[in-house]
Amino acid sequence: MKKFKEYTSLKDGIDIKKASMNDVIKDFKSSDAPQFKGKSEKKKKEMAIAAKLSKEEVEIDEGSDDNLVELIRDITSKMIGAIKKNDQRKLLGLYKNLGKVIK
């Protein structure tokens, strides 16, 4: 699995957590930040998607094992759907969310 740098904001101070995926992608593509120097548009888009997905949070009610089991079932079910659709971006986000739940 590739490792991505964490970005919280770029250029105009965009808040990746609050911004839409499309806005984050546009911001990464138009940025002249040093980390994007020499990167293709496709690579900048991948970096934007990874940054946005890494900011998504999973809320866990740690008081109940039933809730935890249900949450893991839900995430793994969505992962299977992403695999069937060959949606690697969604799969990456779900994988990260699952990692947060299992910790």
Image: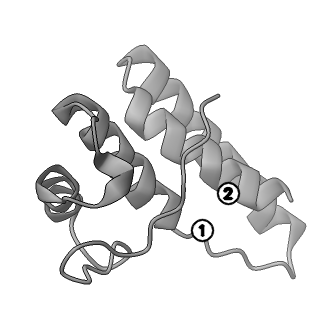
Foreground disc of the pair 1, 2: 1
The image shows residue 84 at horizontal and vertical percentages of: 43, 15
Q: Secondary structure at mark 2?
A: helix
Q: CA distance from mark 1 to mark 2?
A: 9 Å
Q: Earlier in the sequence, mark 1 or mark 2?
A: 1
Q: Observer-nearest residue: 17 or 71?
A: 17
Q: Indicate the quadrant containing the C terminus: top left, top right, bottom left or bottom right.
A: bottom right
How many numbered circles does the render carry?
Answer: 2
Q: Residues within 10 Å of mark 1 (few under 14, many from 20)?
A: few
**Looking at the image, do the residues carrying marks 1 and 2 touch, with CB atoms under 8 Å apart?**
yes
Specify whether 88 is left or right of 73.
left
At label 1, the amino acid type is Val
Across and down, in percent, residue 94 comes to: 55, 45
What is the quadrant of residue 59 in the picture?
Answer: bottom right
Residue at image coords 38%, 52%: 35
Residue 34 disc label = none
The amino acid at mark 2 is Leu
Write down the residue under mark 2.
71
Relative to 64, residue 37 above or below: above
The percent position of residue 63, horizontal first and vertical second, equals 87, 82
Q: Which of the two residues, 6 or 57, is positioned nearer the viewer here? A: 6
Q: Is residue 30 visible?
A: yes
Write down the quadrant of residue 39 in the picture. top left
The residue sitting at 34% across, 38% down in the picture is 46
Name which quarter of the figure residue 62 lies in.
Answer: bottom right
Drawn side of residue 11 relative to residue 69, left or right: left
User: Measured along the vertical axis of the image, is residue 70 above or below residue 19?
Assistant: above
Residue marked by disc 1: 58
Residue under the point 27% across and 42% down:
44
